[in-house]
Amino acid sequence: MTTIASLLADRRDDNGVALVAGDRTWTWRQVVEESAVRAAALPSGHVGVLLENVPEYVFVLYGAALAGAVVVGINPTRRGEELANDIRHTDCEVVLTDSSQARLLDGLDVPPAVRVDGPEWQAQFDRHRGAAIPSSLPAEDDLYLLLFTSGSTGAPKAVRVSQGRAARTAAASGVAFTSDDVLYCAMPLFHGNALLANLFPALVKGSSVVLRPRFSASAFLDDVRRHGCTYFNYVGRALSYILATPESPDDRDNRLKWGLGSEASPRDIAEFRRRFGCYIVEGYGSSENAVVIQPVAGMPPEALGRPKEGLDVAVVDPTTGKECPPARFGPDRRLLNPAEATGEIVGRNGLSSFEGYYNNPEAEAERTRDGWYWTGDLGYRDEDGIFYFAGRTADWLRVDGENFAAGPVERILGRFPGVAAVVVYAVPDPRTADQAMAAVEMDAGVDFDPVAFAAFLDAQPDLGTKWAPRFVRVVESLPLTATRKIDRKPLRSERWVTSDPVWWRPSRDEPYRRLTDDDVAALHDEFRAAGRASLLLGGST
């Protein structure tokens, strides 16, 4: 039987460096000792943790593993009733926080909060100092973690993670590590990426973890040099932020071997390798763990890879339940059949790996309908079995009777010189279905040129006839979730009513011009005249 608790118990005599935070260092033996104290002090039920990446978070995680308690990682970027709902929904008996985060709970109807930097928690330490590892440890199928999904396309859901699943995933992630590796952890510990791709694999192999309170692009290289880090993990746009720091001739003076993450652009991956001499490996997975797609040698740079061995993964038309035909490409890598090849990525034998959502049977039923696991992600697959990402199911657009996914359009618009990042999403059309809108973030010092952009669109052979965005919003920076994934919800909600400059084409044959307040008023009059004004509710009007 392998659990996080048993893995930790196996480290009780290990004097290798386990944890580094600031100027402090703990061996694995010391981490086990500190965790045993927390195991004795923690309640046996659900424990909410509202902390940055501080050592106490690690000790609580491991203490809960030993005690059989359930850790609920609370996202500190949530606010007000949304934050309170997360805590209440997961039946937390107590919330562990500190003086820097406790204010987020002020005025909320939530269980008692205990400050880990306060006298009450310190008194617990004094009472249980020297506690031994419990004689009876949790079983593999005992619930250990509730990990909230990112919520980038809908309300976050709490994913159930057992002791056994956490240990198995950590063992699979840790195959490339040794006890000599130093893992840099700046991703938040309330997220599965930090736990399952960093902290727990280090436990499996006896590697060292360098813990940073929060991600900082400007501090990244100094940190990895100072501590001799050999690996880091990331999600979303972390690479682009690091690449935005000033380049130096000695950027390659580091011990980094590789980084593991998701959702970086092919351009950023290649540039990171050139600049820092570090390989970047991208994979596809989720907190639910039912579908895993891994990179393979020789695949195109924009591809995800092939499913993990033993997984039956398909691209399925969600309306018919039938598998989509393979994608076909022209000699210039133009996708020739996007409409028929794009569908939802589905795991047809992945339900055994998904342990369900906590207290959310409706969401669980939606994910597991027909005995398959429906990822909620769009993709396509080529004739060699290589998968490609095409966005979320919420990223379907229907323009003038044609259905298409946002992902292929984003890849095309990302070629426009000076674009640092781009998001394509549906906004309502005054008369029927949708129009395409794009939000673009430009490179530093580069202005958006609407004339050049229109000419660029006309020159793209793989841009579908309905794919060109009617609206282009130029943002200083795209909105992000706590894990630096692009958050599309505020963009969809705000549509064209924003203080950011918006360029638009009143019709497909006209050039792009600045959208004015008078244009917005006239556009909304069209919605009212067509009886579709209700589509503007819930956002700015």
Image (cartoon, rainbow, N blue to C red):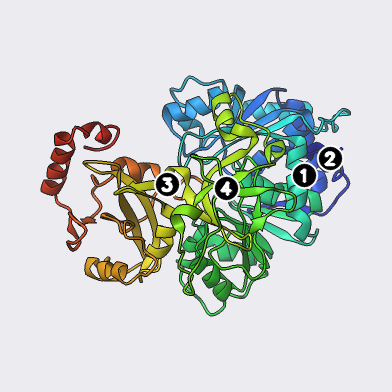
Percent across and percent down for residue 114 are 59, 26
Q: Are marks 2 and 1 in contact (CB under 8 Å)?
A: yes
Distance (Cα) linking label 4 and label 2 = 37 Å
Categorize mark 3 by other alpha carbons within 10 Å: few (<14), some (14-19), many (20+): many
Quarter of the image with the C terminus in it? top left
**Can residue 251 be seen from the camera position used here?**
no
Residue 468 shown left or right of residue 310 in the figure: left
Categorize mark 2 by other alpha carbons within 10 Å: few (<14), some (14-19), many (20+): some
Residue at figure coordinates x 63%, y 40% from the top left: 288
Say which mark, if any, is on residue 168.
1
Residue closer to the observer: 433 or 247: 433
Q: Are marks 3 and 4 in contact (CB under 8 Å)?
A: no
Q: Which residue is mark 4?
A: 323
Percent across and percent down for residue 440 are 34, 58
Residue at figure coordinates x 59%, y 23% from the top left: 359
Q: Are marks 4 and 2 in contact (CB under 8 Å)?
A: no
Percent across and percent down for residue 182 are 71, 60
Secondary structure under badge 4? loop
Q: Earlier in the sequence, mark 2 or mark 1?
A: 2
Residue closer to the observer: 510 or 445: 510
Say which mark, if any, is on residue 395.
3
Above or below — where is 416 with respect to 209?
below
Percent across and percent down for residue 497 are 23, 44
Q: Are marks 3 and 1 in contact (CB under 8 Å)?
A: no
Secondary structure under badge 1? helix
Quarter of the image with the N terminus in it? top right
The kind of residue tagged 2 is Thr
Residue 191 shown left or right of residue 151 in the figure: right
Residue 77 shown left or right of residue 387 in the figure: left
Comparing labels 3 and 4, the label whose residue is closer to the camera: 4
Distance (Cα) linking label 2 and label 1 = 8 Å
Q: Which residue is mark 2?
A: 2
